[in-house]
């Protein structure tokens, strides 16, 4: 039995769907099962409760050999490191209590660098906590998701521009969520691996935001431009337009600056870490209809 957390999230929902399609025995753990489509609920076991309740998490894990664990996404926390560490500490103890054998943890790239990387540093600290749970662990060290472009839809539609505090010519890996999900599923259904390791996953190629703008222009049939902005202006946008907490805005901006300073270079691309979905394929399926 596999326990899937965050089954309504970007990655968790795709993992859940793929596991069901492959005929796996799955249990989901969440607060409100009404958020799951009825046709999915018919095919899985359901455990309800809070990720921050050790007893409820332990009960959800009973009888499960394998866990997919992802800290729930939030942009309103007042202490980013504490937010991630609190979830990881409860999960780690629940894993130990239940005797869960294997854990797939959604982490971030660049863990072995010496850069302070905001949200990614918080993910890395939580990875360390999960790795002390007594289970075998594979931490998926992911780069930026293509899906982050969806937060720029309003600007793309109104102005034909998108903005980040990164040099537009700097190339780094980016990846589609569905490719992360596929790698997670591959590991979740394999009961032979042991030990604690980080596992890098990359998109098909390193790419710059200026290159993304050119490809977006091509598939959208209209000019799209990327513009680098200052740290201060980006934080202001997060606070005023996306209504994030100041702590989250600062942490996300620090992450992006670290990426632009070579954070992901610590984990070189290999054939095993390279995934298949291109940014153009992803944009055609997920973005263009929303900005035209």
Image (cartoon, helix red, strand yellow):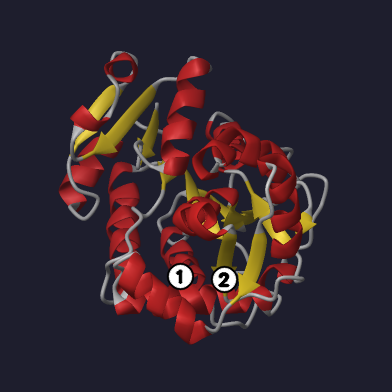
Distance Cα–Cα, label 2 vs label 1: 16 Å
Question: At which x and y percent is residue 172?
Answer: 72, 64
Report the number of numbered marks: 2
In the foreground, 154 or 170:
154
Determine whether the residue tagged by mark 2 lies in a helix, strand or loop: strand
The quadrant in which residue 10 appears is top left
- 180 left or right of 14? right
Mark 1 lies on residue: 119
Residue 44: mark: none
Eye-nearest disc, 2 or 1:
2
In the foreground, 255 or 169:
169
Residue located 37% across and 55% down the image: 71
Residue located 55% across and 33% down the image: 185
| Label 2: few (<14), some (14–19) or many (≥20) C-alpha neighbours in 10 Å | many
Residue located 59% across and 45% down the image: 194
Sequence-wise, the earlier of marks 2 and 1 is 1
With respect to residue 99, does 227 lie above or below?
below
Question: At which x and y percent is residue 39?
Answer: 32, 14
- 34 left or right of 145? left
Residue located 55% across and 29% down the image: 189
Mark 2 lies on residue: 164
């Amino acid at each position: 039995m596999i326990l899937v957390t965050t089954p309504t999230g970007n990655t968790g929902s795709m993992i859940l769907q793929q596991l069901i399609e492959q005929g796996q025995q799955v249990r989901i753990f969440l607060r409100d099962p009404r958020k799951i489509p009825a046709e999915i609920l018919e095919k899985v076991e359901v455990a309800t409760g809070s990720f921050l309740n050790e007893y409820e998490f332990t009960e959800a894990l009973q009888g499960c050999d394998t866990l997919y664990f992802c800290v729930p996404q939030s942009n309103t926390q007042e202490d980013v490191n504490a937010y991630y560490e609190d979830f990881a500490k409860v999960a780690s103890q629940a894993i130990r209590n239940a005797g869960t054998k294997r854990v797939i943890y959604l982490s971030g790239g660049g863990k072995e660098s010496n850069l302070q990387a905001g949200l990614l540093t918080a993910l890395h600290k939580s990875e360390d906590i999960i790795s002390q749970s007594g289970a075998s662990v594979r931490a998926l060290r992911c780069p930026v998701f293509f899906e982050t472009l969806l937060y720029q839809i309003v600007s793309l539609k109104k102005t034909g521009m998108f903005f980040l505090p990164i040099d537009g010519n700097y190339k780094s890996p980016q990846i589609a969520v569905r490719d992360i999900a596929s790698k997670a599923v591959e590991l979740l259904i394999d009961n032979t691996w042991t030990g604690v390791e980080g596992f890098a996953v990359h998109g098909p190629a390193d790419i710059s935001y200026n290159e993304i703008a050119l490809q977006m222009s091509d598939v959208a049939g209209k000019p799209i431009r990327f513009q680098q902005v200052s740290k201060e202006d980006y934080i202001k946008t997060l606070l005023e337009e996306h209504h994030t907490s100041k702590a989250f805005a600062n942490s996300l901006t620090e992450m992006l600056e670290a990426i632009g300073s070579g954070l992901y270079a610590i984990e070189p691309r290999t054939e095993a870490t390279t995934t298949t979905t291109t940014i153009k394929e992803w944009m055609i399926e997920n973005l263009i209809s929303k900005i035209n």
